[in-house]
Amino acid sequence: MTSAAATIPWDELIEHDRVHGSLYTDPDVYAAELERIWYRTWVYVGHVSEVPEPNDYVLKSIGPQPVIMSRDKQGEIHLLLNRCTHRANLVCDAPKGNSSAFRCPYHGWTFSNTGKLLGYPFNSGYAGTALKSELGLGRVPRVASYQGFVFGSFAEDGPTLEEHLGAATDAFDRLVRLSPTGEVELTAGWLQHKCKANWKMLLENETDGYHPQFVHSSIFSVAASGIGDLYGEKSTAVCRDLGNGHTENDLRPEFRRLDQPLGWFGTDPAKVPDYVDQLTAVHGERTREILVDGSPHVMVFPNLFIAEIQLFVIQPTAVDETVQHVTAVQYRGAPDMNRRMLQQTIGSVGPAGFLLADDSEMYERNQRGVQARNPEWLQIKRGTHRERQDENGFTVGDATDEVPQRAIWKHYRSLMEA
Amino acid sequence: MADEVGELSSEFASVRVRIDTDGNGPRLRVEDLRTGHVGFLDPLELETLAWLPEGGLHKLLDPSLHRWRAEDQER
Amino acid sequence: MHGATPALDLDLLREVEQFVYREARYQDELQYDAWESLWTDDGVYWVPANGGDTDPTKQVSIMFDNRARIATRIKQLHTGKRHSQTPPSQLRRLVSNVELLPPPEGATFGPAGDVYAGANFLVYESRERGVTLWAGRSEYALRTTDDGLRMAFKKVTLVDSDRPLYTLAFLI
Ligand code: FES
Ligand SMILES: [Fe+2]
């Protein structure tokens, strides 16, 4: 099989400050992305809290491929492909369950939750048992987690998860630091929001600081919200290239200037006294600073968006169709804060959300717009003249600049040309 | 969370059985009342037990199979 | 209350039917203020995700609006800059199987009414993206007021509530 990626002239489609429209519409580009990104690099799959007990499993995905995330009796987490090794039926159907073994409904082949083929009905038909050792479930060969977030890579070798995450590990650390137990739980269930747009429209929008005042002006104008100002021309917030395609809107400069604990969440400590007490018991004097700084807004390439109190998972299902999965972050052991994060999440995101419905409309309008072939290019040059290095050597730009989009495409190109 | 099903005793063993719902699906929680040791059985495992032929568990009843197993013993 | 034999209270049934048809027309014809006036002051509007029997205080929902949030939703639509409804979806819905129901048992996650009813619906939504069909069931806790029936609680369970959904920015 010839590689789809090898036949595409990436250098002619991706420049430093503009990208070609066909990258969002060409089925060959999509096929190449599956090969070089989704089925090779580290991709976020699920969280350990979704399989809390031995023998728990949940259905997940890596791009369009159905994956079972299981926890075996010993507690180890496996990513198995949800495809019977006999004649390719789905082995599991329920979105989650508890079972030490999976039995395919088509002809009854039965697999352990570690992927081993345990047996099949009427076994004389196979003259011997060699099959059992050969036909275990397909698996994602590399599984690793960071702060409970489980990633899979179809590449047998390559960078470790921590090498891949690089500077983005800090986003996970900052996220779990806000939990009094140091752990987050993804136990609030998922909304699945579908749109007719290429997945990169979503990826680029997650850390786009230029759009909120336009796309979200309707909600900013009717509900008291300070979000709009964070992404204004006067904002001291910055956008950052964290390397490896990971990008950030770092709002901390604004939050520090405003100096209000929990201001980032639109509340104050008096409203969640139990939570603040619990956090103070852990962090002491540093609590105030932690509560002022707030939660990260970081897009982990290619599919996990840590959006303060929500987690989004981008799943491409076709060149022009994407499902965005979203849930509320829950801090283990902080019920008062969790209730608020859940209700704010329900209001903001998902198919009917005050914010995300409008982002999604933009993705679809983008996808229709890019069908027009003149101009051929999308511009991502905003702020090129003022981008700079921060004290850690990362490229940063002003709040509304397109440093993140350039960072994404630079990394994308390196993967596609690899 | 666990719903009590009941306690069963013979002269050889005493167990308490509950339906446990802490995981992503229900499991039968079996507690050995003499030692406090707890094991779980999921629906597919239980169905398998229901279909075991007469004596099908006898291999597992060998005391040296797991619980009273010598360190150097072969499986 | 409508007594021990609700199925025979034809006047009440007729009143409820007229109410849900009117609500449907306000929704289809984007009469946002008229629709909002159908709510009681403590109204709750719930569209569960992942089946109809989740706990919206612990699990995500597609919508779980208290009265203040219903008002915000309407204000947002009125700005004309709610992009997911600019231009608005073109809508027509059929509402059917209207039934008077006994008061629900157990937690409902919304305020009580004095009349309970259920109805099935099928919404035909046309947008630039294409046509989307939304099927489901509405359950109402209604209150009798001097101005006629009002909604204290409306729960909308979509047939597809556990599947990936396109944007749902019109009133369902
Ligand atoms: S396809 Fe699974 S047993 Fe035949
Ligand atoms: Fe947005």
Image (tube, coloured by chain):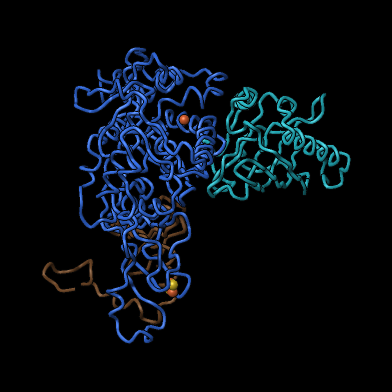
Chain colours: A blue, B brown, C cyan
Image position of A222 with respect to A124: above or below: above
Residue farthest to the front, as pictured: A374
Q: Residue A24 placed where, x, y %? A: 44, 44
Please state which of residues A84 and A103 is positioned toward the viewer in this rendering: A84
The residue that appears at 27% across and 74% down in the rendered structure is: A133
* Whether residue A375 is situated above or below residue A103 in the rendered picture: above
Residue lying furthest left: B72
The quarter of the picture where residue A56 lies is bottom left
Q: Number of marks in the image?
A: 0
| Rendered residue at 43%/67% (across/down) | B44
**Point 46% across, 43% down: residue:** A324
- Residue C105 appears in the picture as rendered: yes
Tell me the quadrant of the picture where the C terminus of chain C can be found. Answer: top right
Where does ligand 1 appear, by image quarter? Answer: bottom left
Give above or below for A387 relative to C142.
above
Q: Is residue A393 left or right of residue A408?
A: left
- Left or right relative to C92: residue C82: left
Q: Please say whether residue A48 is visible from this viewpoint.
A: no
Say which of A147 and A170 sits in front. Answer: A170
Residue A233 placed where, x, y %? 40, 16
Residue A354 in percent (x, y) is at 54, 30
Looking at the image, residue A262 sits to the left or right of residue A391; the answer is right
Residue A22 in the image: above or below residue C43? below
Q: Nearer the viewer, residue A271 or C160?
A: C160
Please state if B9 lies on the left or on the right of B74 as rendered: right
- Give the x, y percent position of residue A315: 43, 47
Q: For this rendering, which residue is in front, C149 or A243?
A: A243
Pick the quarter of the image with the N terminus of chain C: top right
